[in-house]
Image: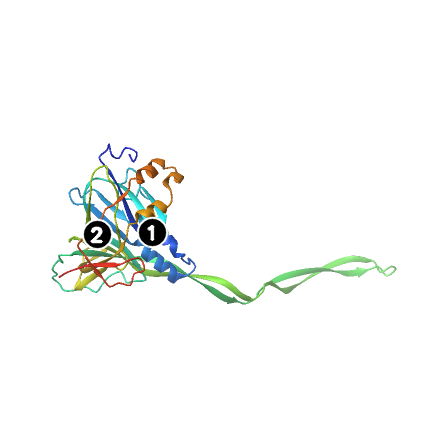
Amino acid sequence: MLAQFKRAGKAILVVPTASLDSLHTDFNNNDSIADFLRLRSGTTEWTNTSRPSSMIKVGYDTKNRGDEDDPTHAYFQVVFGRTMYMIYLVDPGHYSISGVSYNLPRTPGFETPGARTLSSSPLGHAMLKSFTIDEFKRGQKWEDPSYRNATVQEDYCTSRRVVNNECTSWGTSSYDVKQQTSAGGWTPSIEQQTREARAVDVTLDKAFAAFDIAAGEVILIDGFFAEPPAATFKQNSCKQADQQQMRCELQQLSLVQLPGELEGVRQADNPADWGLPKLAQTLKGLTYRPLQIKAREARGDSTWGPTYVLKVE
């Protein structure tokens, strides 16, 4: 399909997202693992507004899941520094950010319920779901020496010849002795702890950013990273939706822009080295397409890029 994407009426789309391989996460440290799991889960969904069944998911946790029969996920990805460029085979049309999802480790699964009757937010809503994550506390514990009792048997002479003192009769006696089986001291220990976490799935009803792509095009756009926590809820706007989920109305959505750099794609991994020479050839025709951004740039503290915000006016 990729080799004949033009004949099939498709297009090639390249979208940047955060490459978490650059973080050098310490997987023996629970704080470091929690930060990694939080960032890894951030996913942004783009939907074709004229063909809602055509959508893509962009995020570190979506890589290596797609194939030519699953256009939702990336067909391939290349990495340059802190940026991972995800490559999609898409239908032509107008694409807009339709939602984001992410996980929050070490966070209560639900918000405090609000009023009995709630009004929907024009911005959209989020569904919250509780789940658990196992953490492992590594340390040392003191262990006392261990012992076991062992029975020792000994033979002894019960009768001897007077002439030469030769033993003519034997008996057996037994007694217990205490033997050390291990020395005392500090030993490594692992303690499992189960922590609550929250899954957040946002449906966006207002335009945040969009782009157009035509059949046969090969384009690069800027990415918007759903760095958790991306959503802010209206006060007292949460209500149990079903047995497992709570619905909260959106007050604000904040996403981090990751600029798409043509030079970055060119200096990234070569798809030909991974057995995809036709993709490498196709990417030589890559051009940059600016986004139509409706959100406003705002002050943020992300290390990945500038923050853009869309809020209820």
Whichever of labels 2 and 1 marks the residue nearer the N terminus, that label is 1
Q: How many marks?
A: 2
- Residue 84 higher or lower than 139, as above or below: above
Q: Position of residue 65 (x, y in %)?
A: 32, 44
**Scheme of image coloration:** rainbow
- Residue 311's label in the rendered image is none
Q: Is residue 86 above or below residue 133?
A: above
Residue 270 in view of the camera: yes
Q: Secondary structure at mark 1?
A: strand
Using the image as rendered, state which of residue 292 and residue 101 is in the foreground: 292
Quarter occupied by the N terminus: top left
Where residue 237 appears, as percent x and y from the top left, is 16, 62
Kind of element beneath mark 2? strand
**Residue drawn at 77 percent across, 57 percent down:** 169
Instruction: Locate residue 32, reporting x and y percent.
Output: 38, 60
Q: Residue at x 46, y 64 (%)?
A: 139
Structural crowding at the residue carrying mark 2, measured as other residues with C-alpha within 10 Å and reported as few (<14), some (14–19) or many (≥20): many
Q: Between tags 2 and 1, which lies in front?
A: 1
Q: CA distance from mark 2 to mark 1?
A: 21 Å
Q: Amino acid at mark 2?
A: Gly
* Mark 1 Cα shell of 10 Å, populated few (<14), some (14-19), many (≥20): many
Q: In front here: 160 or 108?
A: 108
| Contact between labelled residues 1 and 2, with CB atoms less than 8 Å apart | no
Check the image and name the residue furthest to the right: 163
The one of 260 and 49 positioned closer to us in this rendering: 260
Q: Residue 99, which numbered label?
A: 2
Q: Quadrant of residue 41?
A: bottom left
Q: Is residue 158 left or right of residue 46?
A: right
* Amino acid type indicated by mark 1: Thr
Instruction: Name the residue tied to disc 1.
Output: 83
What residue is shown at x 68% (from left), y 60% (from top)?
A: 153
Instruction: For residue 63, say whether it is visible.
Output: no
